[in-house]
């Protein structure tokens, strides 16, 4: 009986010591995860600021590009109207307007700016945000890809690629 009592005492003491150590380990793990999350938040906010800076610089490029596109399309329209006697000028103008709309990247830039704001909102709400961030990264990437595919301009393509690099870094 004494041996059983001694074993029970040792087992109880061992359980108590293990539970105390386990609590310390869990608390340390939670604190480390919180610190890591805060550090990642700062990295993501810095990258969001980089995206905003890039997007602000696109304004001049977009305006210049828009003017050049209009001039080029007007020139092409005059050539087409002059060479095609049976073409309805209004129909041709409608088709060119459709082409202009497809080449316009303003919407993508606007969406990227909205996604930056959404990123700030998600990070400020705290808690578990991994799935929301993954969705936002997909949206960022989609807009950057569309910007690149529509750009038809080296400067805008470079901007789109810079955005993609930052977005990939954010995703990592």
Image (cartoon, rainbow, N blue to C red):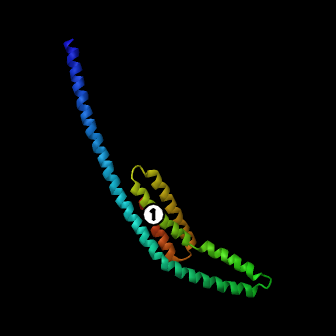
92 left or right of 44? right
* Number of numbered discs: 1
- x 25%, y 32%: residue: 18
Nearer to us in this view, 121 or 68: 121
Query: Residue 87's x, y, as percent?
Result: 77, 81
Query: Residue 86's x, y, as percent?
Result: 80, 83
86 left or right of 172? right
Nearer to us in this view, 11 or 41: 41
Q: Residues within 10 Å of mark 1 (few under 14, many from 20)?
A: some
Residue 117, placed above or below residue 3: below
Can residue 93 be seen here?
yes
Residue 56, placed above or below residue 19: below
Quarter of the image for the N terminus: give it. Answer: top left
Residue 11, placed above or below residue 126: above
| Residue 44 picture quarter | bottom left
Q: Given the current orientation, which residue lies at the most extreme top position?
A: 1
- x 74%, y 78%: residue: 91
Quarter of the image for the C terminus: give it. Answer: bottom left
Query: Residue 31's x, y, as percent?
Result: 29, 47
Query: Residue 121's x, y, as percent?
Result: 43, 59
Q: Which residue is mark 1?
A: 117
| Residue 70 picture quarter | bottom right
- x 44%, y 65%: residue: 165
- x 57%, y 71%: residue: 150
Can residue 172 be seen here?
no
Of helix, strand and loop, which one carries label 1? helix
Nearer to us in this view, 157 or 63: 63
């Amino acid at each position: 009986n004494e041996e059983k009592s001694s074993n029970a005492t040792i087992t109880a003491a061992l359980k108590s010591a293990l539970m105390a150590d386990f609590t310390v380990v869990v608390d340390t793990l939670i604190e480390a995860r919180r610190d890591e999350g805060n550090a990642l938040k700062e990295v993501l906010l810095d990258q969001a600021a980089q995206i905003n800076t890039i997007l602000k610089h696109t304004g001049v490029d977009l305006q210049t590009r828009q003017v050049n596109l209009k001039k080029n399309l007007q020139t092409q329209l005059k050539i087409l109207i002059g060479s095609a006697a049976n073409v309805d000028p209004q129909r041709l103008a409608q088709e060119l307007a459709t082409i202009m709309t497809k080449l316009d990247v303003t919407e993508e830039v606007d969406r990227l700016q909205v996604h930056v704001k959404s990123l700030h909102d998600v990070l400020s709400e705290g808690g578990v945000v991994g799935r929301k961030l993954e969705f936002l990264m997909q949206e960022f990437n989609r807009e950057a890809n569309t910007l690149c595919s529509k750009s038809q301009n080296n400067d805008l393509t470079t901007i789109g690629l810079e955005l993609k690099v930052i977005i990939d870094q954010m995703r990592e």
